[in-house]
Image: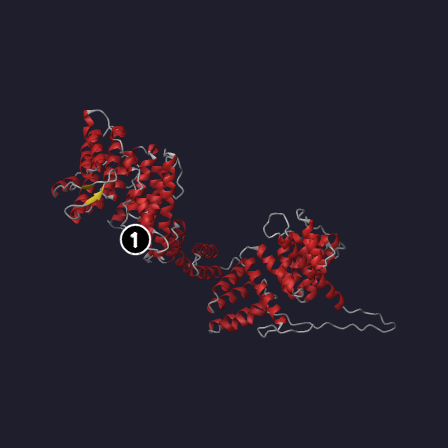
Amino acid sequence: MEQRVNNTGASDTDSVVNQVESLLTSGEEASRSGDSKSALAAFNKAISLDPSSDMAWFNRGVLLEAQQDARGARQAFQICLDVNPNHAPATANLCILLERIGDDVGAYDMAVKALEFYPGHPSILEVKKRCQGSGSTKDIESMEKVDQIEIYDQRDIDKVVEETGLTDVDALLDEAVHHDTDDNQQLDIGELRTAAQVVMATEDIQDRIEVSQPVVEAIPDVPVIPIEPEIEEQLDLDALAEEAKVLIQSGDAKGALSMLKPHLKLEAAKHAPSWLIAGGAMARLDLEEHAISAIEHAQKLDPSNPKGWYNLGSLQQKQGLLREASMCYANALREDPGYVKAAQKWAPLAMELQDPEAYLSAATIIVAANPDNPIKFELAATLIELAEGESRVLELSAGVPPTLPEGPEMAKTALDLLGPGETELHARGYTMANEHMESVKIWKGLIQTDRNNPNTWRGLAKALIAAGDTSTAQKCSIKANEIEAELERKNRPPEITVSNPQSNNEVVLAGSQRITDDSESEGLATNLEEAMTANELLARPPQPETTPEPVENPQVDLAKAALDVQTNSLVQEEFRNPASTSIANQDISWYNQGVALIEAGKYAEALSCFDRALPSFSDDDEMVIRILNGRGNAFYYLENYPACVESYHQAMLIKPEEVRGKTLYNMGTAYAEMERYQDAVKCFEQAIPRGLSKDEVKRTKDQIRRCNILIKEQNKKKR
């Protein structure tokens, strides 16, 4: 064939070779990623350009066999071997395929040949043993064809036949099955053309193979002298891989890859150590995507290698494939539970992915290996938080079994990790472990140290509720709210004007209630232990965390998203008409007055009225729920969001099964104000099935969408 030179100075032959090599590479990458249709299209295109490409035929055979086209796969493997009789993987694959279709004679012959490339291979030895002595054969013509696609335009067929000169329309339709790229079971002219190219390439290579085979004529009376075939020295793949490993360790990653590369798709195609070490060399050469593909192949061949999983996870984590990396570390520890190095990589990643079960698994392994590792305190805190989370699930979803381990057991494990002490974490742990007396004792000690810490008073209130002393707990909660309001008042300018959600006018907020003197605080703390009872109630949720810094992203209008979440509250709808919630009874005038003051925008005064009304209804759950929700709404408008959430939670604990969707929605907006968007989403999701109108459900779903945007941005900033 005359060789021409194109306008770049390269010959046409060189150009075709480069194109074929590029198609093979892209096809193999598509196959590894699971896109078999794109992979097959690439290999078919390579065959059309160069019908003598053995690797293109081999890869086509692998894909067709996976698609249950045994006839097409057999043809592809056979052509591959006709082009390159020493193609080891094709020999092994055809050996297995022939036995499966019932051609035992062909399978035996191919097994004998495959064992020359893979001596001692157990699967091939078994095929040889099973097929030895069998006379069963099956030629390719007797094999079942794939079902043709019957929907096409005959004019398209005629045009393709005219363009290509094909005469076997049946062969064209057989091949076209593998070119239906849009999976619509209908052939267009483009798909018929690509199918025709492969049919023509197949005919071309078969004609060339037939012509190239020498015709042997028998010469009479000439003795045939047997010639012993030259036995090639078998390649020791284990030794090759070890030698490449030494090169990498000495800093010659390029040399290691050059040593392995010629064998990876041939003799070492199924040799896991070779692929694993090649992947390591690629990683050191900054070919990280190729390294990931190589190590993934190695792990498919040998999933029991923990170091392979660890290396793959490290590369994926570096590429930002965090969930995939987490799975790899889990696999490494599955194969080697004592692989501390993998656990140390997995624990912080699991924390970043907010995967508590994965974090617990990793952190537990680390602490078991080194009891003095500082992570044990973080693990203890996580266990207590999970126990508290389980308690919240039980409170808000009556009848639904918990999905996390039992809270008390987790809390006891956490306390064992913490050891002796009287910290806030110890107190929370004792509450979750149902050791309420010890919890109250610690909270009391903390209050004696710092009487003006609202979180300590609130923690004590939770411990008392868990112990059944709701009366004293209520006093502690009020005390916490008073301290918080006073601290907020001190940090504010003398007057603050805010826009009233109920009108377009601006109002001046009155000051909050003052903190009672220290003697009252001391008396309340002193009498707590005596007021304890043996009853145990569900624990309340933990304190809201410190508000994180706002997240910035020029591509997302975070300010608008956050504002939409925070201002789109149902609080104002609950109190839009004071007559709808007021009760015509002089004994509850404080409550009615609070409702009216909410409507008037006088939120601090409304809060004072609700606080005065609360003690009168200790035996009336319905009224206590209304008053606590009213307090929550007042705190919301006062922008005291932690106290707002606290009041809503107090109301929910009384009758969890009757919690209304609007209350959960409003609590979600309060969490959003604190930029605790994960908690906001949970509240919004729980609100939807609890009596919201169609418009309110739509608004709630919009809130979830906005919060999820903000969560992603927060996670980006953390990374």
- Residue that lies at the very extreme toward the right in this rendered image: 221
Instruction: Residue under label 1, please give it.
Output: 550
* Label 1 environment density (alpha carbons within 10 Å; few <14, some 14–19, many ≥20): few
334 lies above or below 115: above
Q: Position of residue 97 (x, y in %)?
A: 67, 56
Whether residue 361 is visible: yes
Q: Along the line of sight, which residue is nearer the eye, 224 or 98? A: 98
Quadrant holding the C terminus: bottom left
The answer to whether residue 295 is left or right of residue 538 is: right
The answer to whether residue 104 is left or right of residue 522 is: right
Q: Position of residue 191 (x, y in %)?
A: 63, 54
* Type of amino acid under label 1: Pro
- Residue that lies at the very extreme toward the top in this rendered image: 585
User: How is the protein colored in the picture?
Assistant: secondary structure
Q: Position of residue 4 (x, y in %)?
A: 64, 73
Whether residue 119 is visible: no
Q: Along the line of sight, which residue is nearer the eye, 689 or 508? A: 508
Quadrant holding the N terminus: bottom right
Q: Which residue is pictured at 58% across the width and 75% down the height?
A: 9
Helix, strand or loop at label 1? It is loop
The answer to whether residue 362 is left or right of residue 144 is: left
Q: Position of residue 439 (x, y in %)?
A: 25, 43
252 lies above or below 494: below
Q: Determine which quarter of the picture holds residue 619.
A: top left
43 lies above or below 183: below
Q: Determine which quarter of the picture holds residue 201.
A: bottom right
Q: Along the line of sight, which residue is nearer the eye, 153 or 497? A: 153
Q: How many marks?
A: 1
The answer to whether residue 615 is left or right of residue 246 is: left
Q: Along the line of sight, which residue is nearer the eye, 495 or 503? A: 503
631 lies above or below 171: above
